[in-house]
Amino acid sequence: MEQTNQSNTNHTEETTVRRELLLNGLDCASCAMKIENGVKKVQGVTACSVNFATQTLKLETRSDLEEEVLSQTKRTVKKLEPKIRVSEKSAGAPGAAGRSGRGVHSHEGHSDAANAHEGHRHDHNHDHAGHEGHSHSHDHGAGETRMMIIRLVTGAVLAAIGLLSPLQGWAELVVFLAAYLIVGGEIVLQAVKNIVRGQVFDEYFLMSLATVGAFAIGQYPEGVAVMLFYQIGELFQGMAVNRSRKSITSLMNIRPDYANLKKGTEVIVVQPEEVAVGDLIVVKPGEKVPLDGIIVEGTSMVDTSALTGESVPREVGRDAEVLGGFINKNGVLTVRVTKIFGESSVSRILELVQNASSRKAQTENFITKFARYYTPAVVIAALLLAVVPPLVINGATFSDWIYRALVFLVISCPCALVVSIPLGFFGGIGAASRNGILVKGSNYLEALNDVKYVVFDKTGTLTKGTFRVTGSYPAAGFESGQLLNLAAHAELHSTHPIAESIRMAFNGSIDGSRVGEYNEISGHGTEAQVDGRAILAGNAKLMKKFNIAYENPQETGTIVHLAADGQYAGYLVISDEIKEDAAKAITSLKELGIRKTVMLTGDAKAVGDAVGRQLGVDEVHAELLPGNKVEEIEKLDAKKSSKEKIIFVGDGINDTPVLARADVGIAMGGLGSDAAIEAADIVIMTDEPSRVAAAIRIARRTRAIVWQNIAFAFGVKAVFLILGAFGIATMWEAVFSDVGVTVLAVLNAMRVLKVNGQDK
């Protein structure tokens, strides 16, 4: 995405750059929303997204305005949330800030990913510095936690003295006021500052108004007790939020810290960003593989679970590919690097998962907008509740109705919704990642709930994309083993995948000295001298070319006919192997209520129909070009209702147009494919089609938990608002309905992380 800006005086090309800031102490989702909306208004900012879960702010601007916009952004954040500490992510790594003299384009995220997790690690290092951020920020360091506990205990002791001692008048007021200021003075101060800035309807204002109002009508003990209980609740809420955040981000803690670079006979420890393509790195037992590469020396077992979700270690040896993020279990491996760190699989995963929350689900967007209007509406309702009844109801007193209005205000805070819903979706994305499924945004996770049609590509998706000899049918006078022997030697020099599958199927060793003249006939097959005999190996056209009578097999698959010295010797059947869990994938989808499964393939109709029958696919369309596949998706789209969604699952290389056209595009085995990463909305990190059903299960579980939170928060608040309006609920119940509901909703959102793709 490169932008060209021209002015009247200077026709220069300006590039768009991305910058990323850390917001240390951001533990309040409504504050994140406020910052995002504020920064979007900064002149020169073309895009802005605040990720509450990872405490990061990402923005885009023109390169010529970059420094000015960055400075203005920092001022805006400090103005909106003065105690949040703003810092830039480490600029030492290449692409750290999305700048290297080039424009931002659709793939730039991958080059920027070199530093994507660096900031995440920075979060861990400074996670406990956040209490000074604001009233929500309670992920304290040990000293700050101690200070908060001392303040709360001191305030509680003073309040107890005020309650139990026979103090009256000014003495009583002074004791309770001292307790109140010790416990909640910072909140009142912040509320005043926000009012001066024109930010009235936030939690600081609501709590300050309610508790100061309690003092105004002589309810000193209740004013102090409510603030005390509120601060204790906030402490637990902050702990719950940060525990949830750490649980989620620990799933992404796969960034390697260093690489052992081999320079001649010497091995030096360097940052992964410093390693170039072609360099040799040494991976010792217990270490993470820092970059993608090919093993040139050594064998070992590697743990791939961080990338693929597979718990069983995989054996690797010379010429095997390893990906950044794998963990070496036992042997020492020497690896030749094939991709720089910014382009490696681990960087792509980190970039995808950490950026996922910028694409918000409809539910998140709804709650964000709802909260914007809900709080002012409740404040106005509380004002009317305080003023109108005493004026129209005989015997009603202002002090009684003001108290009810204050209770009404405390209850109204939408924190439970604003905090728990983004955490719920981010937790769902984290749970999917742990199951080997990369979801690029919560909007795609939510869309999976409405899927009724699942369309699969065949080769590389439902099948392995590797050929295997599945049948040997010798003619009279020949044997099966003899047929494979002749075919393997006849195909000795061919690089075609079919020839390779024949050589693999032959159990004996291939002796090149037995093969004489060799000729590959394009589009037909090969002719070769084997042990002095003229051997032909190829398709039916080859047999016709040499006027050899051949059989017409009924088996489905690729047929290789053989002839020896002009005599028909028989044929081999070569098929693409169906993946072990392909049938399970189709069955699981039908159990989930998917209306129709469809398979699209460019293969022959007979082959496609056979695979479709074997797997139980509802509909098969064969002999299709990529453009025809798009047409089939569009036909299906015309038949479905507007609320129903279509998934297309492909290998992400030849299927890019279809992946982009479907409502949800899922790429299979796309870790090494740029096309898959770019075109798909979801990337399955293994080659298992059954993960599609797992993704749908996780999405449904996530939505269920999110809506549980919405229903719970609305339900409790509605009950307490009514009770407060009728004078039944006191400040104590009001605080529970605010802070208590938020803590419970956050803890419920954390359950998403426990979701397994196999859960029903």
Image (cartoon, rainbow, N blue to C red):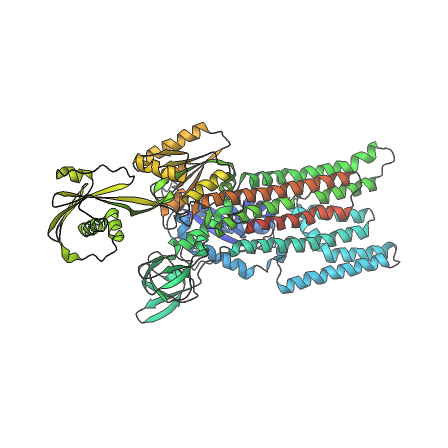
* Residue furthest to the front: 477
Question: Residue at coordinates 16% horizontally, 39% vertically from top-left?
Answer: 543
Q: Quadrant of the N terminus?
A: top left
Q: Nearer the viewer, residue 476 or 719?
A: 476
Residue 264: x, y in percent? 30, 70
Q: Quadrant of the C terminus?
A: top right
Relative to 362, say whether 232 is above or below. Answer: below
Q: Nearer the viewer, residue 559 or 371?
A: 559
Q: Nearer the viewer, residue 533 or 234?
A: 533
Residue 318: x, y in percent? 31, 61
Relative to 492, say whether 598 is above or below. Answer: above
Q: Is residue 566 visible?
A: yes
Question: Residue at coordinates 79% horizontally, 34% vertically from top-left?
Answer: 388
In the figure, is residue 1 to the left or right of 363? left
Question: Residue at coordinates 26% horizontally, 55% vertically from top-left?
Answer: 507
* Residue furthest to the top: 639
What is the count of numbered marks?
A: 0
